[in-house]
Structures are given as C-alpha cells and as structure tokens.
Image (cartoon, grey):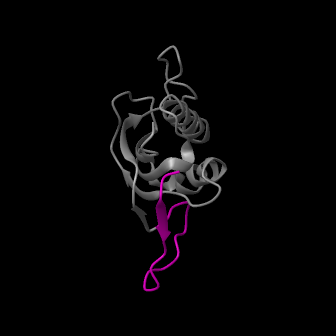
Amino acid sequence: MVDHEYVQPENLSKPIGVWTPAVIVRKGSLVFVSGLTSRDEKGEVAHVGDIRGQTRQICENLRSALRSMGGDLSDVVSVLVHVTDIDEFDAIHEIRREFFPKNPPASTMVQVERLVDKRSLIEITAIAALDNTV
C-alpha cells in the first residue's frame, strides 16, 4: 500500500469543494496522467454541453487508466482542472464527490478560454502514487 498523508494545515481554511490542501507521498511510484477530456472509447467527445456528464466521463476514464496500471482513484494525490466556465464549480464538485468520497486529492481549478476541442468543457490532469510493486 502506498503511504501518503492528507494534510489540513491549522492556519488554512477548510476547502469549499472536493480537495485536500496538501498530500505527502512517503513512498510509491508517481504516475503523471496527461490531461483527460470526456472522449469515449471511440474518441468522440461525450456529453457535449453537459459539464456533469463530461466530468463523470473524465473520472471514469481516469479510473480506467489507473486500473490498467494496478491503481485506482484512491491513488490520485493531485489534479489540475481546466474549465471553460468557472461558474460550473459546484456541478463539477458534485460529481467529483462521487468519485473521491474521502481523502480527495490536492487540486487546482482554473478557467481557460477554450480547450483543444471546442466541445470540451473540462480537462483534468492527475498525479497518482502507486504501490512500488506495480
């Protein structure tokens, strides 16, 4: 099992969404997952115009990628989220809460003008810490 600690420093306010201020990885192999959008198995953008659907597809894609390496979403220690509309924060975190019910990763969310495919509303990049035996 990977040894990491989820840290809520006393002098920082509690997160308003689904993330942890800091995560310490004590051992394990780091996996850097490139930005994922809501493309399905055929490469088509899924859930066009639906931020919840796109967020869910991305989380499922991330889970699939990690499982192929012997990991799971509980191994994610950090995410970088690019969105085209920061006002969708609550909708995005509603879905993230389903996939990260406890000890959510450290997180940054920024608004961008657009993503590579103009139908994409969100892109998530992740760092995971997998057991060294993988």
Residue drawn at point x = 44 percent, y = 80 percent: 12
Q: Which sits in the foreground, 134 or 52?
A: 134
Residue drawn at point x = 61 percent, y = 36 percent: 53
Q: Which sits in the foreground, 36 or 86?
A: 36
Image coords of residue 127 (percent x, y):
39, 47
Residue furthest out toward the front: 133
Up the image or down, 41 lies above or below 79; here it is above
Q: Is residue 12 left or right of residue 52?
A: left
Magenta region: 1-20
Up the image or down, 25 lies above or below 127; here it is below
Verify whether residue 8 appears in magenta: yes
Image coords of residue 125 (percent x, y):
39, 42
Residue furthest out toward the top: 42
Up the image or down, 110 lies above or below 5; here it is above
Image coords of residue 38 (percent x, y):
50, 30
Q: Quadrant of the C terminus?
A: top left
Q: Is residue 89 left or right of residue 26?
A: right
Q: Main secondary structure of the magenta part?
A: loop
- What is the total number of numbered labels drawn onto the structure image? 0
Verify whether residue 42 appears in magenta: no
Residue furthest out toward the bottom: 11
Image coords of residue 107 (percent x, y):
43, 57
Q: Which sits in the foreground, 133 or 91?
A: 133
Q: Quadrant of residue 122?
A: top left
Q: Is residue 53 left or right of residue 36?
A: right
Q: Which sits in the foreground, 122 or 133?
A: 133
